[in-house]
Image (tube, rainbow, N blue to C red):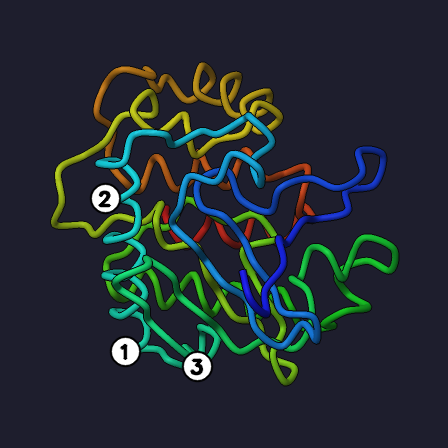
Amino acid sequence: MNRYNYYYNNVPGQGLCRNNLVYTSLINQNKTEFVQWFHNDTEYHRGQNEVMDPVLMEQKWQREVDMLLMMHHNFPEHIPNILELDYDNKKIIYGIDGVDFWEQSHTVGMDAVLPNWRAQMLEILQAHKTLGLYKYSLHPSSYFVVEGKLKSVNYFFCYHKSEPFITVQDHLSHISYERRKYLLPKMKEMHIDINVPTDFSSLQILCLESFRNNYPKDFIEAAIALYK
């Protein structure tokens, strides 16, 4: 792995956990470069690999690249600096200023890490909406703080409004078992069938509802309002 090591989140009460369910996360020693490596690495995922089909991994890689470049072209201020796009090895290397937003906030809270994170995150969601994008990977670990600005990654779980609707069932590999505890009851409440293709806006609201345990109520309510 040369200058990169596996990147894990040190989750309170759980210890070191993989940073992502789909790809393999890498970071350099100085924590100035983060790598999304769309590779099924059993050692990193510790035998709990979610995406083992190489065809599906290729699709996730291509979606990450396509949506990321769309953001880069239209709203470059909302994503980290892309240092390298390695198509041969399916790696994206970003310039960062330390570990991800969630990791930084574990002991001090989000407001201490970035006082205006709510406004910045809503601005990113508004950018997605402007482009007709619906991004369902919204965990705080999907953001980095670079020079005081919130930056978004993880576009492998993102769709454009022109695409066919999707089902939740086809995307369970992207959704942790912990998240499903919140997601499945909300699906029942919102009358969303796991096997029925559902419009992207409803799924975006469902996604935000499932993150109520990760974000303050006022932020979730403001984010949901964008899609109503």
Q: Position of residue 172 (x, y in %)?
A: 40, 25
- 2 or 3: tag closer to the N-terminus: 2
- 1 or 2: tag closer to the N-terminus: 2
Residue lying at the far bottom in this picture: please name it.
147
Question: Residue shown at 25%/65% (left/top)?
Answer: 131
Q: CA distance from mark 1 to mark 3?
A: 9 Å
Q: Position of residue 194 (x, y in %)?
A: 34, 17
Q: Which residue is mark 1?
A: 74
Q: Amino acid at mark 1?
A: Asn
Query: Badge 1: how crowded within 10 Å, few (<14), some, or many (20+)?
Result: few
Q: Which residue is mark 3?
A: 77
Q: Mark 1 against mark 2, which lies toward the viewer?
A: 2
Give the quarter of the figure containing the N terminus. bottom right
Q: Which residue is mark 2?
A: 59
36 to the left or right of 96: left
Q: Position of residue 100 (x, y in %)?
A: 65, 62
- Compared to 32, does 35 lie above or below? above
Decide which of 226, 209 is in the foreground and name it: 209
Question: Residue shown at 37%/49% (left/top)?
Answer: 227
Query: Badge 3: how crowded within 10 Å, few (<14), some, or many (20+)?
Result: some
Where disc 3 sits, the SS reads helix
- Compared to 77, does 27 lie above or below? above
Q: Amino acid at mark 3?
A: Glu
Q: Position of residue 177 (x, y in %)?
A: 57, 23
Q: CA distance from mark 2 to mark 3?
A: 26 Å
Decide which of 144, 135 is in the foreground and name it: 144
Q: Amino acid at mark 2?
A: Gln
Q: CA distance from mark 1 to mark 2?
A: 23 Å
User: Residue 64's quadrant in the figure?
Assistant: bottom left
